[in-house]
Image (spheres, coloured by chain):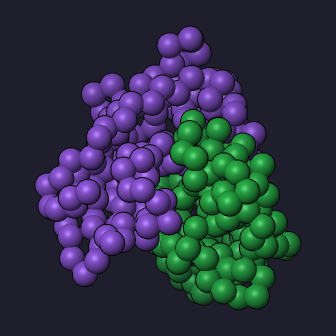
């Protein structure tokens, strides 16, 4: 596998539906009601129930871990949560598309910038993974 | 009650260590919809963001510190970063210690950065989780 600056990783689109949020809440132990109650989300001024930021972050890094052969080669991973991902209460849910590009390769490490888009909006900022290059 | 720079450096250890189970890793991988075989079976490692769950357990101590007066329902997660020494794997018994590293105020909003060190119970490093949260005290 060639890892060089400018290499684009295969993109990934995931769909979040309400049941995905319930499943993530159960598995992660994060039962914040903004992830399952329209009433509570509205009370905080949100446009509706939103996906857990950590669920979006988990999905975004799949672009990288699907690409490298061993997830153990991930050294660093960070994101900013810039826009909420609103998940409607219907069967369609919301699509989030992740793409990534190698920004820097040096000293046995590759730095990869990740982009996350829901609708027309970027929902993560400064999303970056660093992997060990063998 | 407020939070200020004098609270930087406060450290909170999670009350109990976290015993990582193979089935918990699989459940988490299923919940994030990730079919990667590395997250399944006897030699399963945990997906990278699994580390946050252990950080949240240490954060509970921070939320319980009455001097800080933080409320979970007033917190928004602004940023998250992980540095990995090695992946978490089934069978690990992990200790988590959270330390407040930065406090910044903007009106009613307090931006707090805390770092959670994840180690084996014997002290071998596994990962560091760095979280930035905004807390809206909403007193004015």
Q: Colour of chain A?
A: purple
Q: Is residue A126 visible?
A: no
Question: Where is residue B99, by image quadrant?
Answer: bottom right
Most foreground residue, B118 or B134: B118
Q: Is residue A112 above or below residue A56?
A: below
Q: Is residue A24 above or below residue A28?
A: above
Q: Is residue B24 left or right of residue A62?
A: right
| Residue at 56%, 11% in the rendered image | A91
Q: Is residue B54 left or right of residue A134?
A: right
| Residue at 75%, 70% in the rendered image | B92
Q: Is residue B79 above or below residue B113?
A: above
| Residue at 66%, 57% in the rendered image | B44
- The location of residue B46, given as percent across then percent down, is 63, 57
Q: Is residue B65 left or right of residue A125?
A: right
Most foreground residue, A12 or B117: A12
Q: Which chain is green?
A: B
Report the residue that reaches farthest toward the left: A6
Q: Quadrant of the C terminus of chain B?
A: bottom right
Report the residue that reaches farthest toward the right: B16
Q: Is residue B43 visible?
A: yes
- The location of residue A27, given as percent across then percent down, is 72, 43
Q: Quadrant of the N terminus of chain B?
A: bottom right
Question: Where is residue A121, by image quadrant?
Answer: top left
Q: Is residue A80 left or right of residue B4?
A: left
- The location of residue A53, given as percent across then percent down, is 52, 45
């Amino acid at each position: 596998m060639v890892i060089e600056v400018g290499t684009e990783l295969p993109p990934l689109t995931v769909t979040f539906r309400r049941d995905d949020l319930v499943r993530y809440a159960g598995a992660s132990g994060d039962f914040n009601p903004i992830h399952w109650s329209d009433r509570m989300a509205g009370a905080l001024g949100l446009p509706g129930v939103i996906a857990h930021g950590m669920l979006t972050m988990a999905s975004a890094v799949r672009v990288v871990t699907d690409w490298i052969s061993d997830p153990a080669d991930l050294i660093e991973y960070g994101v900013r949560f810039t826009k909420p991902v609103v998940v409607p209460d219907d069967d369609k849910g919301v699509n989030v598309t992740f793409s990534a590009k190698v920004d820097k390769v040096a000293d046995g490490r590759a730095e990869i910038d990740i982009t996350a888009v829901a609708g027309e909006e970027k929902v993560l900022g400064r999303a970056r993974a660093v992997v060990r290059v063998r | 009650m407020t939070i200020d720079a004098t609270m930087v450096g406060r450290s909170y250890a999670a009350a109990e260590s976290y015993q990582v189970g193979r089935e918990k890793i699989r459940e988490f991988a299923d919940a994030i919809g990730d079919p990667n075989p590395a997250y399944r079976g006897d030699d399963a490692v945990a997906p990278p963001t699994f580390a946050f769950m252990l950080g949240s357990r240490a954060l509970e101590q921070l939320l319980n510190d009455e001097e800080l007066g933080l409320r979970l329902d007033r917190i928004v997660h602004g940023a998250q970063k992980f540095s990995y020494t090695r992946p978490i794997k089934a069978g690990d018994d992990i200790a988590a210690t959270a330390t407040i590293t930065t406090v910044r105020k903007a009106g009613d909003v307090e931006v707090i950065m805390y770092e959670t060190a994840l180690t084996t119970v014997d002290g071998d490093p596994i990962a560091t989780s760095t979280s930035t949260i905004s807390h809206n005290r909403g007193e004015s």
